[in-house]
Image (cartoon, helix red, strand yellow):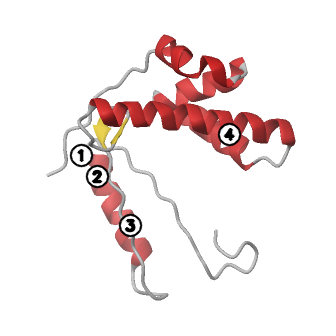
Amino acid sequence: TLPTPVAYHWDPGELDRRVEAHGLEPRTRDLAIGVLSGDRTALSRAITLVESSRGDHRDQAELLLDAVLQARVLGRSEAGGADTTLGTPSFRVGIAGPPGAGKSTFIEALGLMLAEQGHRVAVVAVDPSSTRYGGA
């Protein structure tokens, strides 16, 4: 069985201490705190920042990723090496198969079941046959 989700509150002062030397702009710092606190709006804005091609955005995106990853690494070491996200264990599942095999149906059913149990679910879909990007 999966562990019961727990509320996790990130201490902004802790983030300040860890990334003080990184040069995060206040807005980027707020995004990092939001991402670490589980704020979906902050996560969507962080994704937009990371995907931006503007030079100033790229610099802040790298700093944002560094800050969040540093916090995760520290969280992992404090959890005895367990991979944690927002204070709870996280799992990654890869699903592959030919067209029409039922991958999307399975992902939807699994996601709904986990969400009903109170777990947070994210799906990243990759299509390596995409002609536009070579993978989406």
Q: Are marks 2 and 4 in contact (CB under 8 Å)?
A: no
Give the amino acid type for the residue marked by disc 3 in the picture: Ile
**Residue at the spot of label 1:** 117
Q: Nearer the viewer, residue 135 or 115?
A: 135
**In the rendered structure, which disc, 1 or 4, sits on the residue that comes first in sequence?**
4
Rendered residue at 64%/20% (across/down): 21
**In the rendered structure, which disc, 1 or 3, sits on the residue that comes first in sequence?**
3
Q: Are marks 1 and 2 in contact (CB under 8 Å)?
A: yes
- Residue 110 screen position, x and y as percent: 31, 62
| Up-down relation of residue 36 to residue 54 (above or below) | above
Using the numbered discs, state the Cα–Cα distance from disc 3 to disc 2 in whole angstroms.
11 Å
**In the rendered structure, which disc, 3 or 4, sits on the residue that comes first in sequence?**
4
Give the amino acid type for the residue marked by disc 2 in the picture: Leu
Which mark is on residue 114?
2
Quadrant (top left, top right, bottom left, bottom right) of the C terminus = bottom right
Q: Are marks 1 and 3 in contact (CB under 8 Å)?
A: no
Give the amino acid type for the residue marked by disc 1 in the picture: Gln
Q: Residues within 10 Å of mark 1 (few under 14, many from 20)?
A: few
**Residue at the spot of label 4:** 62
Q: Quadrant of residue 10?
A: top left
- Residue 111 screen position, x and y as percent: 35, 57
How many marks the image carries: the answer is 4
**In the rendered structure, which disc, 2 or 4, sits on the residue that comes first in sequence?**
4
Q: Are marks 3 and 4 in contact (CB under 8 Å)?
A: no
Rendered residue at 32%/47% (across/down): 90
